[in-house]
Image: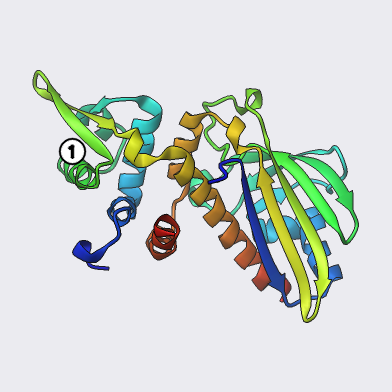
């Protein structure tokens, strides 16, 4: 998949194709706007790495940041995320995987 | 787009009795689904299943409430999809209904799975499910691309 030729939605999914970034999105989704400090807390990933991941997400339009004093605050862009659709897609994929396991189990 | 239900249809190359056992026997169901249950499925039974296929969620239990059991034809249960965060009380949220329908067809068994009731799930929980997708995402990107461009 080359970045330039991908469908409009593809960069979103490519950006989410990483566990750390998925985790960041999930934290922003449940915790609201958060600073780098809060996003890095309790994680094995460095602050610099988290920043890079957030910038990838920002390029995909999934998050944006704003400055509050010395802190950058990151916020989820829910319109782009289209939560309901993605959620269903995940559940749907979950079933595809489960049914594939069932197939292997009974065949 | 229908946001309330997911439907999957697959043909399994196995006799219906075999597929039925894999779905209706709690031990067999758990083996492919990734949960370990104590006890047998029975209509109305409240079942706790321990997650066995994800080290990230080891020790977390998932609750099933068995709905209907019609041998060789229908099995259904209600649950809280992706209810794995110990700090969240899912019991106040609506459950989704998961139904398995079995039909004999040439060469095997047609299995239809319908999960419905998503519209009752709070949006924040939907987003949280992102975190659940702990593996294989890259492999799924092309599927998802087809989905979004379709």
Q: Quadrant of the N terminus of chain A?
A: bottom left
Which chain is indicated by disc 1? A
- Number of callouts in the render? 1
Q: Write the residue at 61% across / 30% down.
A: B120
Q: Is residue B3 left or right of residue B8?
A: left
Q: Position of residue B97 (x, y in %)?
A: 71, 41
Q: Is residue A77 left or right of residue B30?
A: left
Identify the element where label 1 is drawn. helix
Q: Is residue B72 left or right of residue A95?
A: right
**Label 1 neighbourhood size at 10 Å, few (<14), some (14-19), many (20+)?**
some
Query: Does any portion of residue B53 appear in the rendered image?
Result: no
Q: Which residue is mark 1?
A: A47
Q: Write the residue at 78% across / 76% down.
A: B108
Q: Quadrant of residue B15?
A: bottom right
Q: Position of residue A56 (x, y in %)?
A: 21, 48
Nearer the observer, B145 or A90: B145
Question: Above or below — where is A40 with respect to B72?
Answer: above
Question: Above or below — where is B48 with respect to B93?
Answer: below
Q: Write the residue at 78% across / 71% down.
A: B109
Q: Quadrant of residue B43?
A: top right
> Which residue is the extreme one toward the right?
B71
């Amino acid at each position: 998949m080359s970045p330039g030729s991908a469908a409009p939605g593809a960069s979103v999914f490519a950006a989410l194709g990483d566990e750390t970034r998925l985790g960041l999105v999930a934290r922003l989704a449940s915790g609201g706007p958060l600073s780098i400090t809060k996003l890095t807390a309790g994680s094995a990933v460095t602050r610099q790495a988290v920043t890079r991941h957030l910038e990838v997400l920002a390029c995909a339009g999934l998050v944006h940041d704003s400055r509050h004093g010395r802190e950058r605050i990151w916020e989820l862009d829910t319109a782009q995320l289209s939560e309901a659709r993605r959620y269903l897609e995940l559940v749907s994929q979950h079933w595809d995987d489960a049914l594939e396991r069932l197939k292997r189990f009974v065949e | 787009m229908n946001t309330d239900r997911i439907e999957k249809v697959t043909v399994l190359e196995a006799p219906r009795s075999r597929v039925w056992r894999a779905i209706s026997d709690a031990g067999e169901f758990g083996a492919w689904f990734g949960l370990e249950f104590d006890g047998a499925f029975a209509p109305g039974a409240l079942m706790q299943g321990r997650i066995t296929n994800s080290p990230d969620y080891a020790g977390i239990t998932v609750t099933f409430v068995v709905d209907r059991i019609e041998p060789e034809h229908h099995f259904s249960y209600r649950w809280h999809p992706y209810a794995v965060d110990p700090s969240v009380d899912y019991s106040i949220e609506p459950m989704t209904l998961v139904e398995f329908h079995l039909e004999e067809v040439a060469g095997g068994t047609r299995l239809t799975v319908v999960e419905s009731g998503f519209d009752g799930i709070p949006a924040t929980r939907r987003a949280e499910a992102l975190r659940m997708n702990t593996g294989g995402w890259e492999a799924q990107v092309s599927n998802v691309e087809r989905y979004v461009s379709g």
